[in-house]
Amino acid sequence: DAGITQSPRHKVTETGTPVTLRCHQTENHRYMYWYRQDPGHGLRLIHYSYGVKDTDKGEVSDGYSVSRSKTEDFLLTLESATSSQTSVYFCATMDSTYEQYFGPGTRLTVT
Amino acid sequence: AQRVTQPEKLLSVFKGAPVELKCNYSYSGSPELFWYVQYSRQRLQLLLRHISRESIKGFTADLNKGETSFHLKKPFAQEEDSAMYYCALTHGSGNTGKLIFGQGTTLQVKP
């Protein structure tokens, strides 16, 4: 499992509240990613990081921000949650062979 | 635009039957193609990648650049193959590892 954990695993929140999801890895991988998984869309990249304090946008970054202050932690923040952000969120890391390893996922429901 | 298309949302076969999960892509350049699998209650994990030319769990996939396809095949399906399968692509070597996923195909192998 490449030592990737996500917290929380499940969260229900109300529209308009801020939410932060955490991804933690123990493999010292340089690259980390946040994806969301929705029926009919597969997984879509939200943001990614290529090092400490180095991040960039993905395909569906609107309404999301990220931070990476340490190699092992990558945080995803929903500044003001909306119902359209109800989804399953996956964190991933990438090793030197370009294989990605995924976390267990966080199921977020915005009511 | 870069895109991965999996035309079948659900593929249902009987145990022992051949399986082919279709994947077509559009990309200008030399992408790297992957198949990821998500078994029930497990993490998304790499099944195979075109550059390795391996056969994993009896599955193979051949990159057809002329038809821009990367179909996943197995001659005799097993019940334990039931899972969600995602085709994905990324840029060639030296890239940031950003994956573009297809919509996913659920494979159901009936006894």
Image (cartoon, coloured by chain):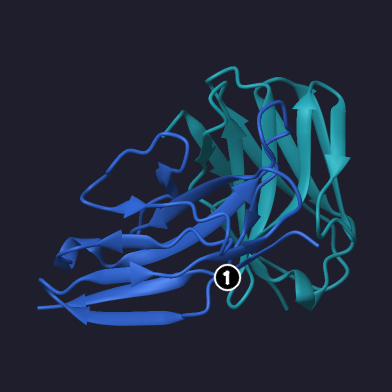
Chain colours: A cyan, B blue
Q: Amino acid at mark 1?
A: Gln
In the image, A3 versus B11, the foreground residue is: B11
Residue drawn at x 39%, y 69% is: B21
Q: Residue at 48% of width from left, 58% of height from top? A: B70
Q: Is residue B29 left or right of residue B48?
A: right
- The answer, for residue A98, to whether it is visible in the render is yes
* Horizontal side, residue B44 vs residue A56: left or right: left
Q: Position of residue A103 (x, y in %)?
A: 52, 43
Q: Is residue B40 visible?
A: no
Q: Residues within 10 Å of mark 1 (few under 14, many from 20)?
A: many
Above or below, comparing residue A97 to residue A40 in the picture: above
Chain of the residue under the numbered disc 1 shown in the image: B
Location of residue A25 with respect to A84 vertically, above or below: above
Residue with the mark numbered 1:
B103
Q: Position of residue A26 (x, y in %)?
A: 53, 21
* Figure quadrant of the C terminus of chain B: bottom left
* Secondary structure found at label 1: loop
Q: Please tell me which residue is depicted at 59% across the width and 40% down the height of the picture.
A: A92
Residue A29 percent coordinates (x, y): 61, 22
Task: Name the residue nearer the viewer: B51 or B9.
Answer: B51
Examine the rendered structure and indicate whether residue B51 appears above or below residue B10: above
Judging depth in this view, the residue of B77 and A107 nearest the camera is B77
Q: Quadrant of the N terminus of chain B?
A: bottom right
Question: Image check: A55 left or right of B34?
Answer: right
Residue B79, image x, y percentages: 16, 67
Q: Is residue A12 left or right of residue B108?
A: right
Which quarter of the picture shows residue A18?
Answer: bottom right
Q: Residue at x 56, y 64 (%)?
A: B67
